[in-house]
Image (spheres, rainbow, N blue to C red):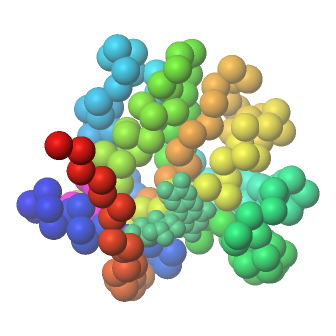
């Protein structure tokens, strides 16, 4: 697939089939992730792959309660509250796999490094016919000690990018983009 096609065609997928994602496919995605640019080539990332659906259900439920209890007032807070309050809402959309990218070293750019790795992973998944979605709803809980315990993450790790992966049940419509705010100097 052409790079332009992957960049413009990738969508956040929120409906998945039950089809499992095998280890080889996940390793290919992680291989793409680790080719991301990263500050001083520190490669400060680790990848935690969760395919246990019971565990994902439990993390979802705890993350929802955590978000409801700690969520700051934002422009979307009311909408988020309704969604998070719905017992039927599972934040991972029952995707067959979660790949959590954690920052495992210290430094001023570890979050940027992991986010770039996440974008590589999502574009590569799309080119391989898979859907992905970054689950920000999980991030804050996965940085608490309870959240880290649930996935067996060391205390010092920072959970940056929880990315769900699976086969899309339906192709999401394109999400419109605003005109970019571009300033030219010279
Ligand atoms: C940091 C980040 C956090 C996100 N968190 C969520 C989330 O918790 N749940 C969700 O359904 N989508 C989440 N998304 C997906 C965005 O809503 C989506 O990327 C955006 O609406 C644009 O749509 P597109 O990815 O299809 O272009 C997140 C995306 C990013 C980059």
- The residue that appears at 67% across and 53% down in the rendered structure is 138
- The residue that appears at 44% across and 41% down in the rendered structure is 115
Q: Residue furthest left?
A: 2
**Can residue 58 be seen in this snapshot?**
no
Residue 150 percent coordinates (x, y):
76, 41
Q: Is residue 160 left or right of residue 23?
A: right
Q: Which is nearer the eye, 160 or 175?
A: 175
Q: Which is nearer the eye, 184 or 71?
A: 184
Q: Image quarter for residue 43?
A: top left
**Can residue 117 be seen in this snapshot?**
yes
Residue 18 percent coordinates (x, y):
48, 73
Residue 80 percent coordinates (x, y):
73, 72
Magenta segment's dominant SS is: helix
- The residue that appears at 24% across and 44% down in the rendered structure is 185
- The quadrant of the picture occupied by the C terminus is top left
Q: Which is nearer the eye, 24 or 12?
A: 12
Q: Is residue 51 above or below residue 90?
A: above
Residue 173 percent coordinates (x, y):
37, 85
Q: Is residue 47 left or right of residue 91?
A: left
Q: Is residue 32 left or right of residue 45?
A: left
Q: Image quarter for residue 68?
A: bottom right
Bounds of the magenta segment: 123-127
- The residue that appears at 63% across and 60% down in the rendered structure is 53
Question: Magenta segment: does it hold 124?
Answer: yes
Q: Is residue 74 above or below residue 156?
A: below
Q: Is residue 31 above or below residue 174?
A: above
Q: How many numbered circles does the render carry?
A: 0
Question: Magenta segment: does it hold 65?
Answer: no
- The quadrant of the picture occupied by the N terminus is bottom left
């Amino acid at each position: 697939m052409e790079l332009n096609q992957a960049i413009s065609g990738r969508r956040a997928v929120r409906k998945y089939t039950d089809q499992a994602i095998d280890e080889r496919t996940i390793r290919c995605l992680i291989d793409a992730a680790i080719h991301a640019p990263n500050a001083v080539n520190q490669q400060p990332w680790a990848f935690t792959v969760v395919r246990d659906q019971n565990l994902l259900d439990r993390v979802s439920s705890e993350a929802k309660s955590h978000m409801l209890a700690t969520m700051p007032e934002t422009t979307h807070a009311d909408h988020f509250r309704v969604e998070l309050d719905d017992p039927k809402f599972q934040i991972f959309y029952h995707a067959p796999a979660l790949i959590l990218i954690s920052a495992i070293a210290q430094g001023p750019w570890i979050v940027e490094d992991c986010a770039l790795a996440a974008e590589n992973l999502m574009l590569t998944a799309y080119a391989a016919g898979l859907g992905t979605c970054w689950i920000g709803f999980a991030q804050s809980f996965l940085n608490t000690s309870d959240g880290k315990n649930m996935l067996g993450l060391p205390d010092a790790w920072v959970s940056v990018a929880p990315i769900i992966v699976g086969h899309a049940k339906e192709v999401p419509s394109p999400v419109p983009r605003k005109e970019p705010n571009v300033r030219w100097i010279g």
